[in-house]
Image (spheres, rainbow, N blue to C red):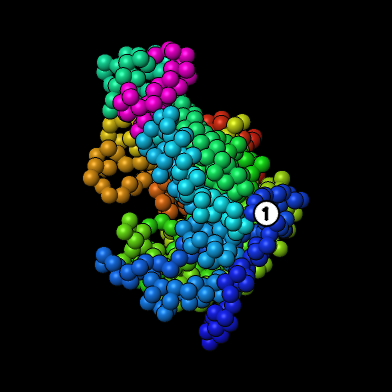
Amino acid sequence: MVLVFLITILWALPTGSLPAAGGPDQVGAPASGWSTAKEQGVWWFVTPQGKRFFSVGVNVVTGGSEDRHFRGRTWYSWASYYPSFEMWLLATRVRLREWGFNTAGGWSLHPKELRLPSTPELDLGRLSRFHWFDPFEPSTADRMKQLAKELTAPYRGSPFRIGYFSDNEVGWWNGPLFVYYIQKPPSNHTKRRLVEFLKEHYQGDWSRFLKDFQVPFGVRSFEELAKTAGTDVLLRPGGEGIQVVRRWTGIISSHYYRLVWEALKEADPEALVLGDRLPIYYDPYAVRAMVPYVDVISTNYNVDSPEGWLASYFFEGLMELAPSRPVLISEWFFASKENRTGNRNLGHLMTVGTQKERAAGAKEAAKAFAKQPQVVGIHWFQYWDHPKGGRLDGEDYNFGLVDVDDRPYEELVEEFRKVNPTLREIHARSGLTLSRYPSGPIRIPKARIDSSDNHLGDWPKPQSLLPRLKSPPGEIPFGEFYMAWDHGALHLAMIAMDYQDPELLAFQGEFPLGEAFRVDWGLKAGSSVRRFRMFLVPPSREEDVGKDTYKMNLRLCRWDELPGCSPVPGALARYFGSDQPRIVVELSLPWEALGLQGPPVEGALSTELAVTGFYRARWMSLSGLPPAQAMEELGAWRKVELVGFKK
């Protein structure tokens, strides 16, 4: 009834007098250019009127499909619910304002229709054939500049236009970028640039190159490599070639960001360049490469735990890599198995059981995002559910604020209605946040943990979060740990990110353990010292043949004086989430595995944790020592107190 009344009132207003839903009224702004600013340690968007702005947006604010039923699916379609598109538009403006949203995110209607600050996604790199064609081909830059002028023309000069996303989820997966271009023919400019880079890196020494890479028989020099096509150049197990592959990622991503920056700043100088919406993962080389060529770093994000917890290492890493750039969460979401559309939620993205849980998790996640001082906005994905039967690409999630029948999910939008207006003030206080990592012994809570439930919702946070791990100079931590205890076991969880391309390594049969992702865990209680190792092992060549999914294997070992990978009786280790790049592991280790009958008598332990990424590309540890050294230097292990322990 309230919605009908508001629509009636708004219907009587001329379009120019409509307020921006929850955001600043940009009509009459002195200029069209937005900017960013850092005040007292907190980043903000700044409107054309000079006001601080925390962007609370929604992606895909459109009327949906022209056809309600299409290719065996039932789609959201405005014509099924409203007598005219204008009536749908008015109702949607009212809803977004009532629910506290102030921005239209990617793939939304033009701001002249929504009257909202907007962040259009252009697909500039894809449309200009940068990705997976020949990015170093000389005409790429001119083609991108011409396209930028065409794509920005509808928005140029609009005070509602914050800036542009150049693309969505380019990814910068290091392996495919190397494998794909090294196989290109000699006519490919990017292939030639890659071989030139390899020759420069190895100072023309082919024998040094062969220590890191395996090439087909008959290829005997860089000059011959440049003349090949379809040639496999693979990492040699035990070599250091992955560092060369990572550097190539930096070279090609820097080229992309520079061309995008030049094209967009020439086409629309007043607009912010918002980056390419990183895919819930980032490559450090790509982030460093983008810093000179973006105004804002945008990243999509998969919330880490059902209650709305966010892994702090992800944001701390961005702050360390790019302290001069704010971050926009360009996409975040919650789905529920309980939904009216019938979405199946197939995959690894955050899914809970009920709409009540969905609403509660989204509320807490929104507040957690706002507490990050470098985050200038959060954009929910998306306005309406995926169609019943799933998108044409197979994605099928209950992401909507409304279902495919235009009915709001009441619990969710009610929580947004209450929390969204508070986010600006929460964000304003984020610069005052105290360190989560006090010095002294690590105090871990007592908690009942179920390591078989495939989520971290039962972990007490932040109490169980361990101090930030340390990486060597030039690197950043790529994960974090949680620890808790009870009278039966010691519990460990890890949230991390890493990536490996199965086509990059030269091997037959079983994947070499020395190239797998691994976690080393050392524990000392009194005179008892134990070392354990968890491997994340990609499938063998034989296992991978003909499979639609690519499934990692988790292997837990006792790894000290015992030979090989000895099993750990009574331990429960689970690997869940996506197979990569997001890595989530949960482990319950019975006290008997430490040679104890229960918690240590004094209630104290010492511990060390060290992680080595795929192909030994990078590492991190509690002590800051390299993994092998960290496991041996017991004096550097951190003391642990069991909170709540009683003799």
| Residue annotated with mark 1 | 31
Say whether residue 186 is magenta.
yes
Q: Is residue 277 above or below residue 234?
A: below
In the picture shown, does residue 254 fall above or below 160?
above
* Quarter of image, res 528: top right
Question: Principal SS element in the magenta part?
Answer: helix
Residue 210: x %, y % from top left: 38, 18
- Residue 645 visible to the viewer: no
Disc 1 secondary structure class: loop
Q: Which residues are magenta?
A: 179-206
Name the image quarter holding residue 418: bottom right
Residue at coordinates 31% horizontally, 19% vertically from top-left? 227
Determine whether, in the image, residue 118 is placed left or right of residue 248: right
Residue ID at (57%, 66%): 115
Query: Does any portion of residue 547 appear in the rendered image?
Result: yes
Residue positioned 34% across, 61% down in the render:
391
Classed neighbour count for the residue bearing mark 1: other residues with Cα under 10 Å, few (<14), some (14–19), many (≥20): some
Q: Amino acid at mark 1?
A: Ala
Question: Percent position (x, y) of residue 619?
Answer: 53, 35
